Image: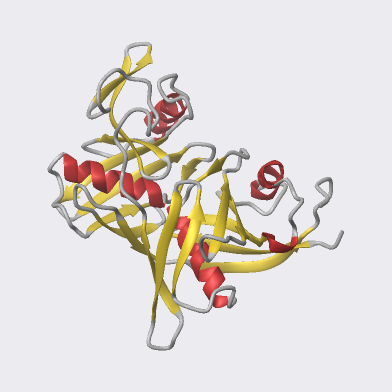
Amino acid sequence: MDPLPFTKMQGIGNDFVIIDGRSYPCIDWSALSSELCDRYRGIGADGLLVLDTSNIADIVMRMYNPDGTPDVCGNGLRCLVRYAIDRDIVQQDTITVVTLAGIREAAANRNPDGNISEVRVAMGAPKFDPASVPIRITGLEAYDFPLDLGQSRELVVTALSTGSTHAVTFVDELPDDERFFEYSPLVEHHPRFPERTSLMWCRVMDRDHLMLRVWERGAGETLGCGTGACASAVAAVRHGFCAAGGPVTVTSKGGSLRIEWRPGEQIYMCGPAEYVYEGVYNLGSHPA
């Protein structure tokens, strides 16, 4: 089979391999994602995004973590929207995208020169009930829930779903490497999270600004996380740290996003989507 064309894109440092999958209906993308995302033996990325056709929206986004698990990704969604618009796969700047979390509407913002500068996405309403997160607890929701990590270690988290499972912990200072790499995988694989969870270490700078250190399920530390930024802003609003409606600027190692949310409404996320390079990849042992 001919080499597989791909585009590398990133949103606040969260990077993705993007493939137009409409011509490759028989590829096992989940099996291929770990190979493509490997930073030493493959292309290298935080995730694989596959564009496909839909009969209920403009396009479908299939997203896979580096370990092959399907997921939802806000930064990836913005990148795929720009990719689809720039390549005339869709002919308008406001489009709908099918994701694992449902249909999302996105709009491209353009510079005076006509190039897309940012993408704003309606991310749906956050979910707090344990079955939707999901988290194994007996209460109505995991709000400031003390998570026992063993060996006298505990982390207080607020767990919610913004299309993907997140645990948010508020800290006075972002963790150093020792604490971050010790605690984060314990939270991701904690038995209370049947589908694992990402962990957002969140420092409140002021009522309009949050700082994050990000641990994503299936990927480890990443420079940014769109759904995680949304979860952190929602949790901060519910704790009274930030004002409802926002916008709240959420900054991680890779850059900043603007998040808007009012209780009872859906979340809006706005941020960049940028090209890195294009290439082709030899499928090797993964023929179509």
Viewer-proximal residue, 219 or 58?
Answer: 58
Residue 13 visible in the snapshot: no
Where is residue 131? Give x, y as percent: 37, 28
Residue 40: where, in percent of width, then height?
Answer: 68, 47
Residue at 29% over, 54% down: 267
Q: Nearer the viewer, residue 9 or 140?
A: 140
Quadrant in which residue 66 is drawn: top right
Tell me if 57 is positioned left or right of 249 in this view. Answer: right
In the rendered view, would you say 120 is above or below 111?
Answer: above
Q: Please report the residue visible at 55 percent of the width from the left and 70 percent of the height from the top.
A: 84
State left or right for residue 222 relative to residue 235: right
Residue depicted at x 58% and y 38%: 69
Q: Residue at x 21, y 37 (%)?
A: 172
Q: Is residue 114 above or below residue 122?
A: below
Is residue 81 visible to us here? yes
Residue 100 in the image: x percent, y percent? 50, 46
Coloration of the structure image: secondary structure
Q: Is residue 93 above or below residue 62?
A: below
**Residue 104 found in image quarter:** bottom left
Q: Position of residue 36 (x, y in %)?
A: 68, 50
Q: Is residue 69 left or right of residue 203?
A: right
Picture layout, residue 235 above or below residue 14: above
| Horizontal side, residue 201 vs residue 47: left or right | left
